Image (tube, rainbow, N blue to C red):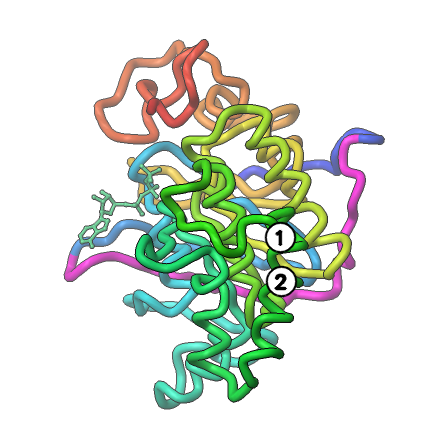
Amino acid sequence: MPVSTMPAAPPGEAAHKPDDSETLLSLRDITIGYGTKVIQSDVSLDVRRGSIFAIMGGSGCGKSTILRSMVGLLRPMSGKYTVDGDDYWSGPDSHRTALNRRFGVLFQSGALWSSMTVGANVSLPLEMFTRLGKDMIRHLVEMKLGLVGLSHAIDLYPSEISGGMCKRAGLARAMALDPDVLFFDEPSAGLDPITSARLDDLILTLRDGLGATIVVVSHELPSLFAIADDGIFLDAQTKKPIAHGSPRDLRDHSTDPQVHAFMNREARTEPATNGPGGADTARKGQNASGK
Ligand SMILES: Nc1ncnc2c1ncn2[C@@H]1O[C@H](COP(=O)(O)OP(=O)(O)OP(=O)(O)O)[C@@H](O)[C@H]1O
């Protein structure tokens, strides 16, 4: 299927326009999979500095797999990944470790250590990767928690706070080392719409206030329309990207039936397919994730 080229977003919809000339992360002809099983091939994308980039597609198409690869957890079978022009997978592990210091990651689960307070969770990366003293670390932790509106929760345990607060604490931890690139895997999964909208605002603040570059995997269409500047749509059947563009552009202008149906939460009229990313993933009136 052809990759759609999208026109610019309608006036007023794309409030933020990053500088086109500034590519921070670049994937070229990446093939990725597990063992010999290919999950996605021919993946090429550019993430502009200071933008929010969405990885989209039906369940199981390989969104998290691409994200895992971009943070160094899975080496692609082929293709090139550059970070600020630097070939990520070339050279020794220390080369990647240095680049990883620029990354903050929030995985789907939020994954806070349950036996540690919120403050201790956020201070962990600072204790592991810096030589800062206790007072300075406490100060930085207070700052990060202040950013996500959780100053009051510093001494609470994860079991004592809500799911949305856990997500925000995870965000504070992802930001502990002042990364300039943040990767979020399903940040609003499991959150109610209001908490999810607050998290969107926070993500926008990270982009606009701190100049962070953000890559996000998400099924949540309202959230994608609210925050993402650009994106890619992966297809599970062909195992290739089938569209590039901002979620708003794909919703309003995509000529690909699958992409159009997914982005508009419509039932598809063509014959159903069994695989993820097929008709079953885009039924009207359901979460597009099918979850
Ligand atoms: N560690 C693994 N080993 C083998 N196969 C895996 C592994 N992790 C994921 N997969 C497979 O890779 C495919 C893509 O999974 P992935 O989690 O990347 O999809 P996704 O698009 O993020 O899905 P979802 O939206 O449901 O979270 C799936 O078929 C999955 O079963």
Say if 282 sits above or below 119 in the image: above
Left or right of residue 270, residue 105 in this image:
right
Crowd rating for badge 2 (residues with CA inside 10 Å; few <14, some 14–19, many 20+) = many
- Quarter holding the C terminus is top left
Closest to the observer, 112 or 184: 112
Q: What residue is at 50 percent from the left and 76 percent from the top?
A: 126
Residue 266 drawn at (x, y percent): 47, 13
Residue drawn at point x = 46 percent, y = 60 percent: 105
Q: Are marks 2 and 1 in contact (CB under 8 Å)?
A: yes
Residue under pointer 2: 142
Quadrant (top left, top right, bottom left, bottom right) of the N terminus: top left
Question: Residue 47 is drawn in which quadrant?
Answer: bottom right
In this view of the protein, can residue 82 be seen by the observer?
yes
Q: Residue furthest left?
A: 36
Residue 279: x and y in percent read 34, 19
Q: Which residue is mark 1?
A: 151
Q: Which region shows up in magenta?
A: 13-36
Which amino acid, mark 1? Ser
Tell me the distance, in whole angstroms, between the alpha carbons under discs 2 and 1: 6 Å
Q: In the rendering, at what x and y percent does residue 160 appear? A: 41, 41
Farthest residue toward the right? 11
Residue 16 placement, left or right of 96: right
Residue 76 shown left or right of residue 155 in the figure: left
From the viewer's side, name the closer residue of 78 and 117.
117
Dot 1: element: helix
